């Protein structure tokens, strides 16, 4: 991309802002070299990285790049055998540790919110904790080699401290001596050339022995090393030289360790720079309130409330523009200072930002195109040195653009044709626009020439646009209106400012009839636009009202659902309490049955069971929606002796034995009862009579019928319920004359089988019992022989 055009569109200012958000020198280097990309897939990858960093920054904050530095130079010196100083080694360890932290940070975010691109970058960061530990064990945070770096260094430094302490003690004893104090300029101990000295007055030089190492500027003071400590200072210097040799050995060892990982660490630097670059783009997007644009390479762009990123967000007027679908060229007309140039720069700069992988300050749903190049001729670029006029300067730029552009380029031209004769300038502007349009490039051009309004009106694929101007306040609104050509507004402004009416009328007469028609047409379009805008605002207001009503209705619906849920919970709780009460009463009845079984030797007869069942039925909670069917209203039913009926009060089926007026005698099991006809319902009429011998009324024996079977299946029952069922089954089988019956209880744990067989031992109708044979069910069946 042409550097001059990037400068014209203020792209470097965006790069400076982006660089300020980079956390490391590595990231800053990447941002400073950022250029727009011209391949769609590459741009999508850049934007994806920005989107992932944006999400990561929102979830967990920025990645921890603290401690990361550009260590490429020390790494290259280590690779060729140079010895690194403590600060360089400390930077290597800090950068390695910082890389591990960044890697861990991204891994944590990826588990919660997938960020595949950043995760892939972070996975390439190699970890070298052993190197970090080795360096941190030898060098402290102030880049000083620690005493613990080696045992030899520790011993040397202990001897150094001891030697310095002895020298100071010796000198302090000397300066406290009265004979020496009178010869001293000050009673202090100081250093000269790394040797301990004391300040002696010049006149006492001959009487004070020792070596002179320095003197004051005035010459009145000599810094003398007394003879008594010369040997001690010499030893101290020897030990310091030994200290430096040991430190050099330690640094060489650590450098050799770092040299083993030079290639890995250089790769880490590149990856950390890319990650810092991604997070810098995310932070810039947060600051600018920017969004991710949809990208294409079809030459289509659509900005929704796009803002120039370098203008105060509270002052800039948003831009709505679409290019490359129904029309490929926009001709913007209107007065100066109306915002035409800002609109051109906004389109160009946002396109460059998107092509660089940056989010743009526009609403969601905005689309931008990846152009092969963006060309711009904007502003007054008159060159005094080259003696070029404004027209010549602009034309030189345009010629360069025409020679370089392609059908996939975006061309931005400001004040096209200005600076020369209006007639020639407008004709040249139309010819240039026609050439660019024929090539297929996307064009946005601004002009003052009214001839270009007519060109845009008559040319397919070209559309007029203008910057809105408020006549009432005589000021521009800076809004771009696509589809409406600009008006000169000169007469209206003159009239508002107080120019005499006759002068204005005379001026109108000087304007050609064709120009007046054009102005009237524009005025009509403007009036229609304002009317449509008013209707749009009214529709928007209605839409907002409907949204509020919908939200209110939704809130009421949710409130109703919550109330319904509460009522359901209350009803369920009441039902639970009713069931619990019924269960308690049932438990009492079962306990009473157990008591009866104990008292009567497990021979509770059917009439007692019927009475117990009635009590259970009464204990059940009432169902308000259930209505008893039958003859409650006393409707006559044709019930005859031998019919099967349902007795409602007992909830039992029985056979009608005889009928007496409104009552009937009903056989219920082994018992006969008198029941009212309106308390029963016909279930099945009697079968056709067969020739049978009359039975005695008092006999307890009855023939076999379809209602009694020779087997009883108790699988799944508990023991108490099973005993009751067995007792009823044995009574009915005995009355039916069965000699042998089968009780199926299953194998299971054996509890049911054991309990039933114990009960059979005591039962009066049972002669004997046994487990089932092979083919009868084995131990899962008990076969009982009846009396």
Image (cartoon, rainbow, N blue to C red):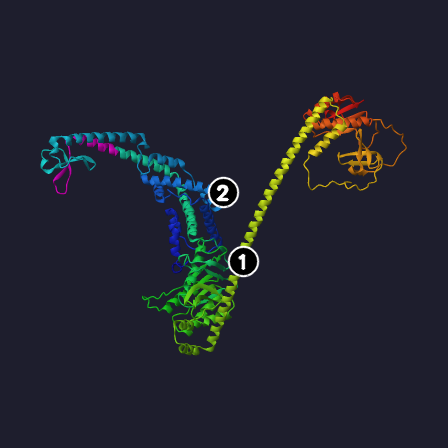
Is 355 situated above or below 100? below
Residue 305 x/y as whole percent: 47, 58
The label nearer to you, 1 versus 2, is 1
Is 547 situated above or below 169? below
The answer to whether any part of residue 632 appears in the image is: yes
Residue 46 x/y as whole percent: 46, 51
Q: Quadrant of residue 773?
A: top right
Q: Which residue is drawn at 82% across and 40% down?
A: 637
Is residue 295 inside the magenta stretch?
Answer: no
C-alpha span from label 1 to label 2: 37 Å
How busy is the neighbourhood of tag 2: few (under 14 within 10 Å), some, or many (20 plus)? few
Q: Which residue is drawn at 81% across and 24% down?
A: 739
Q: Which residue is drawn at 42% across and 65% down?
A: 476
Mark 1 and mark 2 lie on one chain; the one further toward the N terminus is 2
The residue beneath circle 1 is: 543
Between 498 and 72, the residue placed more toward the observer is 498
How busy is the neighbourhood of tag 1: few (under 14 within 10 Å), some, or many (20 plus)? few
Q: Quadrant of residue 715?
A: top right
Residue 250 x/y as whole percent: 32, 34
Is 405 situated above or below 136? below
The answer to whether any part of residue 414 appears in the image is: no
Residue 112's disc is 2
Q: Magenta residues, as a range? A: 212-241
Q: What quarter of the picture does the N terminus occupy?
A: bottom left
Q: What element carries label 1?
A: helix
Q: Which residue is drawn at 65% across and 33% down?
A: 581
């Amino acid at each position: 991309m042409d550097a001059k055009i990037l400068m014209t569109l203020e792209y470097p200012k965006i790069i400076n802002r982006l660089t300020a958000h980079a956390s490391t020198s590595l990231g800053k280097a990447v941002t400073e070299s950022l250029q727009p990309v011209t391949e769609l897939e590459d741009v999508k990858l850049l934007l994806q990285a920005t989107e992932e960093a944006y999400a990561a920054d929102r979830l967990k904050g920025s990645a921890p790049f603290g401690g990361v530095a550009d260590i490429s130079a020390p790494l290259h010196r280590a690779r060729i055998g140079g010895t690194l100083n403590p600060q360089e080694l400390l930077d290597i360890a800090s950068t390695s540790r910082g890389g591990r932290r960044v890697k861990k940070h991204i891994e944590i975010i990826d588990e919660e919110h997938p960020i595949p691109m950043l995760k892939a970058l972070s996975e390439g960061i190699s970890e070298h904790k052993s190197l970090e530990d080795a360096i941190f064990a030898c060098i402290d945070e102030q880049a000083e080699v620690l005493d613990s770096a080696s045992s030899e260094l520790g011993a040397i430094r202990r001897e150094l401290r001891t030697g310095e302490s002895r020298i100071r003690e010796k000198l302090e004893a000397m300066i406290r001596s009265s004979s020496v104090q009178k010869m001293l300029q000050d009673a202090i101990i100081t250093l000269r050339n790394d040797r301990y000295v004391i300040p002696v007055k010049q006149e006492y030089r001959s009487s004070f022995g020792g070596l002179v190492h320095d003197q004051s500027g005035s010459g009145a003071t000599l810094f003398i090393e007394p003879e008594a400590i010369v040997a001690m200072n010499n030893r101290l210097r020897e030990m310091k030289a030994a200290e430096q040799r040991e430190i050099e050995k330690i640094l060489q060892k650590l450098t050799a360790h770092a040299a083993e990982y030079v290639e890995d660490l250089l790769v880490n630097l590149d990856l950390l720079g890319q990650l810092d670059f991604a997070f810098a783009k995310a932070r810039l997007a947060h600051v600018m309130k920017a969004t991710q644009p949809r990208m294409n390479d079809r030459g289509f762009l659509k900005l929704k409330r796009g803002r120039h990123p370098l203008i105060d967000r509270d002052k800039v007027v948003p831009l709505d523009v679409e290019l490359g679908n129904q029309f490929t060229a926009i001709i913007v007309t209107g007065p100066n200072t109306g915002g035409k140039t800002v609109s051109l720069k906004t389109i160009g700069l946002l396109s460059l930002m998107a092509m660089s992988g940056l989010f743009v300050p526009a609403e969601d749903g905005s689309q931008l195109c990846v152009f092969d190049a963006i060309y711009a001729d904007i502003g007054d670029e008159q060159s005094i040195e080259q003696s070029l006029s404004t027209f010549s300067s602009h034309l030189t730029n345009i010629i360069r653009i025409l020679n370089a552009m392609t059908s996939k380029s975006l061309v931005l031209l400001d004040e096209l044709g200005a600076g020369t004769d209006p007639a020639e300038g407008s004709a040249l502007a139309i010819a240039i626009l026609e050439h660019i349009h024929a090539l297929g490039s996307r064009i946005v051009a601004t002009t003052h020439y009214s001839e270009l309004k007519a060109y845009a009106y008559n040319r397919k694929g070209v559309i007029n646009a203008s910057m809105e101007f408020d006549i009432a306040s005589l000021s521009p609104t800076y809004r771009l209106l696509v589809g409406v050509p600009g008006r000169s507004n000169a007469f209206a402004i003159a009239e508002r400012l107080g120019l005499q009416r006759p002068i204005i009328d005379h001026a109108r007469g000087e304007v050609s009839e064709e120009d007046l028609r054009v102005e009237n047409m524009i005025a009509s379009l403007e009036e229609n636009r304002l009317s449509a805008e008013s209707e749009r605002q009214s529709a928007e207001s209605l839409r907002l009202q409907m949204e509020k009503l919908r939200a209110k209705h939704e809130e009421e619906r949710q409130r109703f659902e919550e109330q319904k849920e509460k009522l359901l919970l209350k009803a369920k709780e009441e039902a639970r309490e009713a069931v619990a009460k019924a269960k308690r009463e049932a438990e009492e009845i079962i306990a009473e049955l157990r008591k009866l079984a104990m008292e009567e030797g497990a021979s509770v007869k059917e009439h007692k069971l019927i009475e117990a069942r009635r009590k259970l039925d009464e204990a059940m909670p009432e169902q308000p929606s259930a209505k008893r069917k039958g003859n409650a209203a006393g409707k006559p039913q044709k019930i005859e002796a031998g019919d099967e009926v349902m007795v409602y009060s007992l909830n039992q089926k029985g056979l009608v034995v005889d009928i007496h007026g409104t009552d009937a005698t009903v056989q219920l099991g082994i018992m006969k009862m008198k029941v009212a006809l309106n308390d029963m319902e016909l279930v099945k009429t009697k079968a056709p009579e067969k020739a049978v011998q009359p039975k005695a009324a008092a006999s307890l024996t009855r023939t076999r019928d379809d209602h009694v079977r020779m087997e009883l299946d108790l699988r799944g029952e508990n023991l108490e319920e099973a005993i009751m069922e067995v007792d009823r089954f044995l009574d009915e089988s005995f009355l039916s004359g069965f000699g042998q019956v089968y009780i199926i209880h299953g194998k299971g744990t054996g509890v049911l089988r054991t309990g039933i067989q114990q009960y059979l031992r005591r039962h009066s109708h049972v002669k004997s019992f046994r487990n089932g044979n092979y083919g009868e069910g084995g131990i899962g069946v008990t076969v009982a022989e009846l009396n």
